[in-house]
């Protein structure tokens, strides 16, 4: 299956592409097919997400700087790179779900 639907009684369901959340779930040693993020794990998950987002932001800034420094860069290629979705935008719904689940002391599940 190409999609993962995260569910929690604290928030509405969120469906994401498996490829987009695989790195996060692998870091957490979670199965992409079926799993749970317990309320006790949410702080750890948030720290990992913050690190992934910070790394993505740094890479985007470095890439942008490199493109500005290189007169030979293809403007079409630069435009396409700038149109990719940042991790902060991609993970925003999941981060909101994590916050609500933590506040309401609920787990997040997928693959059920």
Image (cartoon, helix red, strand yellow):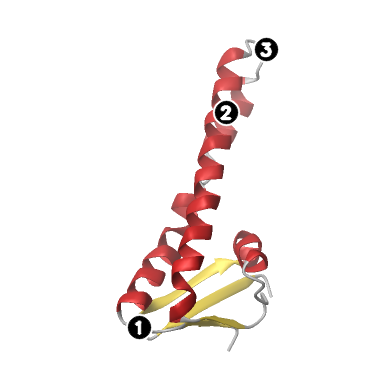
What is the CA distance from the residue labelled 1 to the residue labelled 2? 39 Å
> Residue at coordinates 55% horizontally, 43% vertically from top-left?
56
| Sequence-wise first label, 1 or 2 | 2
- Quadrant containing the C terminus is bottom right
Mark closer to the observer (3, 1): 1
Nearest-to-viewer mark from 2 and 3 = 2
Which disc number belongs to residue 62?
2
The structure residue drawn at horizontal position 45% and vertical position 72%, both measured from the top left corner, is 42
Mark 2 vs 3, N-terminal side: 2
Q: Is residue 80 left or right of residue 105?
A: right
Neighbours of disc 2 within 10 Å: few (<14), some (14-19), many (20+)? few
Q: CA distance from mark 2 to mark 3?
A: 17 Å
Residue 80 higher or lower than 71, as above or below = below
Task: Residue under label 1, please give it.
Answer: 105
Query: For the residue labelled by badge 3, is the local secondary structure a helix, a strand or a loop?
Result: loop
Task: Please report whichever mark, 3 or 1, sits nearer to the chain's N-terminal start.
Answer: 3
Q: Nearer the viewer, residue 24 or 68?
A: 24
* Front disc: 1 or 2: 1
For disc 1, the neighbor class at 10 Å (few under 14, some 14 to 19, many from 20) is: some
The residue that disc 3 covers is: 72
């Amino acid at each position: 299956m190409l999609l993962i639907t995260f569910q929690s009684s604290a928030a509405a369901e969120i469906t994401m592409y498996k490829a987009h959340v695989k790195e996060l779930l692998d870091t957490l040693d979670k199965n992409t097919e079926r799993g749970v993020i317990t309320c006790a794990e949410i702080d750890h998950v948030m720290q990992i997400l913050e690190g992934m987002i910070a790394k993505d932001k740094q890479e985007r800034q470095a890439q942008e700087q490199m493109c500005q420094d290189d007169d030979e860069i293809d403007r079409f290629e630069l435009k396409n790179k700038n149109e990719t979705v940042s991790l902060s935008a991609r993970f925003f719904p999941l981060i909101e779900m994590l916050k609500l689940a933590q506040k309401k002391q609920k787990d997040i599940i997928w693959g059920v």
